[in-house]
Image (spheres, rainbow, N blue to C red):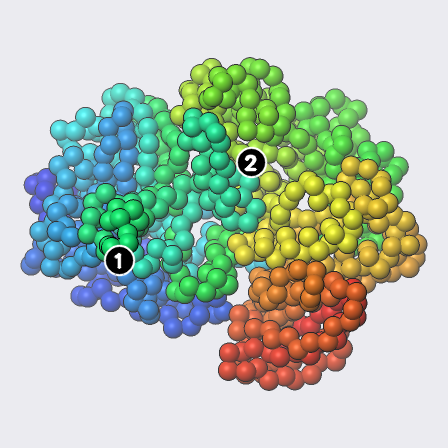
Amino acid sequence: MLPLILSLLTSNHHAPHTLPGNLQGKYRTEVVSKADPSVQSSDWLISKPVAQSKLLIQSDKRVGNNRLVLANGLISRTFFVGENLACISMKRLGLNTEFVRAVGPEVRLSIDKVWYEVGGLKGQPENSYLLEEWLPSLKSAPSAYQYVGFETSAPEERYHWEQKFHSRPANWPPAGVRLTFHFLAPSNSPVAGTSVDVHYEMYDGMPILEKSFTFHNRSSRPLTVDSIEGEHLAVAQDQVSRLHAESDFSFAMANNNPEGSGLIHFQSSVMSKYMYGMGTTRWIVDPEYNTWATHNQAEDNFLSRPHHCLLISSPNSGPARKIEPASEFRSMRTFELLQDSDDQERKTLGHRRLYRILAPQVTENLLCGSITSQDPKQLKSFIDQMGELGFERLDINPWPGISHTNLDPEYLAKWKGIADYAREKGIVMGGYELTVASRSWGADVDVISPDTLKPGSIFGQSVCIASKWYDSYFGSLWKFLDATGFRTWNADGPYHGDACASTVHKYHSGLEDSQWQQWSQMVSVIHELQRRNNYVPLPDWYFLNGQCVTGMGYREASATLSPAQQLLLGRQYIYDGTWHKIPTMGWLTLQLVGFYSNDPKVGLEPLQQNIDRYERGLVQHLGAGCQFSVRGNRLYDTEATKAMVTKWVSWFKKYRDVLTGDIIHVSRPTGRDLDCIMHVNPGGQHKGMAIVFNPTNTAIKRTLSLPLYYAGLSGKATAHAMDTPGRPIRLDANQIAHIAVNIPANGFTWVEFE
């Protein structure tokens, strides 16, 4: 039986719904005579939340229509209840900017090759704008799923997470309200007996909402959910650039931006269908919007530049899942961030805040030492140095890395002994394995190319994780972790989202459901790792499902560059990679030895002879706050080297709160002039810190203009340069500090603000 909390069933199928007046005890609901949400005036990127998320209910029985308004002081989303339920407004409050230009369905889904709409209303005369007086005359499509009720609750815990590994304090799940609308298929429909629940979550203090749906098959026969549109929103043309949307169905190796920041193109039209974009966000031409304006029809073909202002959240293929009777299907979750500015820094700060609150494991960070050796004596010597210097995580690097399927008792005992030894010194450990990407595990479990129908993927060869390999490999992995006490699984892949044409793999039926199922299998792995309180590094973009870190920026060619080249390129990776990532979401490596060889031109051995370059590398990576590892066979070779490393590790731990704060992009590294990033931490004692490098062979004296608005400072501040006594400074009207620096050739400085 459909679990309705607030039943709105009526005897007439298309009669206007009415809302009950007594809602006492319902979670964060309020009955109002006029739905007029309060506005939070403080800046959400600086201040703590003021207004709670809640559902405002406005019912007017005289005219037979009702309003439901989900609001939190920053944004609102409004639903009209007439013959069916439809979203009629989505606003950024305070600015009063309207994002919705036309009504549409809540969800669309194809069942057994027939498309059905969930909710929505028809008959809007014009789709470039929406007038209030049109609403009572709008009709429900006869075949649409019909709205029958709603309920509210607290937001769901999407996966298990506990605060650990120096993560920021966070509410999990985040505070807010969850609103679920219930819809039934018409009794005369081919899908009669099925229902759809559309879920919204709105969070306190964030202009962000999440949307998903659940399909329930309560019919007597299996049904296949072929394709889905979890969001179908007609957006005002002038607000398209201010609506950021992404879903947790994302697996591409998109180091600088989710939703496929770099699109992958193939000559094969078959493969490109499945790979394009790697996410679910689609901005497409609205086929029902045919009155859009061209500004110069003499020069423009009328149809040559249509407006892409219909937001669709849909996988490229599938899910193509057969749902048995008494079973359900859950969609991906789509997150929507309503921006209030076109400024790049502000917009991406909002995106970074989304991850901090909705994926708090990304704030976990551990100082990592990496070593290739598997000799117990050398490993323990390396761990001893890590313990002395204050490092916190040991990673066994390739080659040969760790075999997580090797359950030989002697092999397990060896690694348990190393893990126990590290744990005694406060160090967690794990190891690298080339698991999925670019590796064959056998013809019966490898990805089958849609082009050739033979084993092969875009990376040469990879296993299909929706095959029986999933059971054998991960069954062994869990036993390995239990036996050894490893706290990280450092896997290479799967980051490409291969489409697999096999029809005999255990967990997918064919090509159309292969991506959905491989994604689902990987999500279950990450959720299990979080349940075990592991640290989760992956070269993917599963952050909204529990991943901790991915590459800050990566090309293997950089591993053979000189140390000076590696450092400048690394600062470019940091500068570019932190527009859409917080620092701890990106990993980098400081190579003390070569990645492919011990060529002294690539590494820094002997360390004492290269102590200045070693120091610059430490300052660069620690000063960026990124998740980086020092890779070598030892971390120091003399007392002087040890003292230098100790100094900077202690410095990082003193200022960890601000150094892992978001980055304001001041000046990009070019190698020709000063480059600068500035961390901001408005809620902490250390509110800002600028890190400045001079990569040239000449000293540079300069006055830097450092924007401190997002550090939460106003009017005045105290500046500490390189731990010198603080001096008061005045900020200008835009909260910019003007700081004079004099940096020697190939030198650096830092300035902390309180």
Q: Is residue 655 left or right of residue 163?
A: right
* Nearer the observer, 210 or 751: 751
Q: Nearer the viewer, residue 576 or 663?
A: 576
Q: Which residue lies at the image location 38% right of the left edge and 58% below the top edge?
A: 242
Q: Quadrant of the N terminus?
A: top left
Quarter of the figure with the C terminus: bottom right
Q: Quadrant of residue 147?
A: top left
Q: Vertically, is 561 above or below 59?
A: above
Residue identifier under label 1: 296
N-term mark: 2 or 1: 1
Measured along the vertical axis of the image, is residue 455 above or below residue 17?
A: above
Tell me the crowding category of disc 1: few under 14, some 14 to 19, or many 20 or more residues within 10 angstroms, Cα based.
Answer: few
Task: Kindly identify which numbered label has been placed on residue 495.
Answer: 2
Element under disc 2: loop
Three-letter amino acid code at disc 2?
Answer: Tyr
| Element type where label 1 sits in the image | loop
Left or right of 294 in this view: 270? right
Q: Nearer the viewer, residue 535 or 5?
A: 535
**Where 493 sits versus 469, above or below?**
below
Amino acid carrying mark 1 in the image: Asn
Say left or right for 289 vs 691: left
Name the residue rendered at 19%, 66% in the picture: 34
Quarter of the image where one finds residue 208: bottom left
**Residue depicted at 64% across the width and 55% down the height:** 572
Q: Which mark is residue 223?
A: none
- Up the image or down, 53 lies above or below 247; here it is below
* Image spot of residue 536 (x, y percent): 61, 42
Residue 474: x and y in percent read 59, 27
Residue at 33% across / 58% down in the picture? 239
Residue 315: image location, x then y, percent:
39, 36
Question: Residue 100, can we see it?
Answer: no
Q: CA distance from mark 2 to mark 1?
A: 44 Å
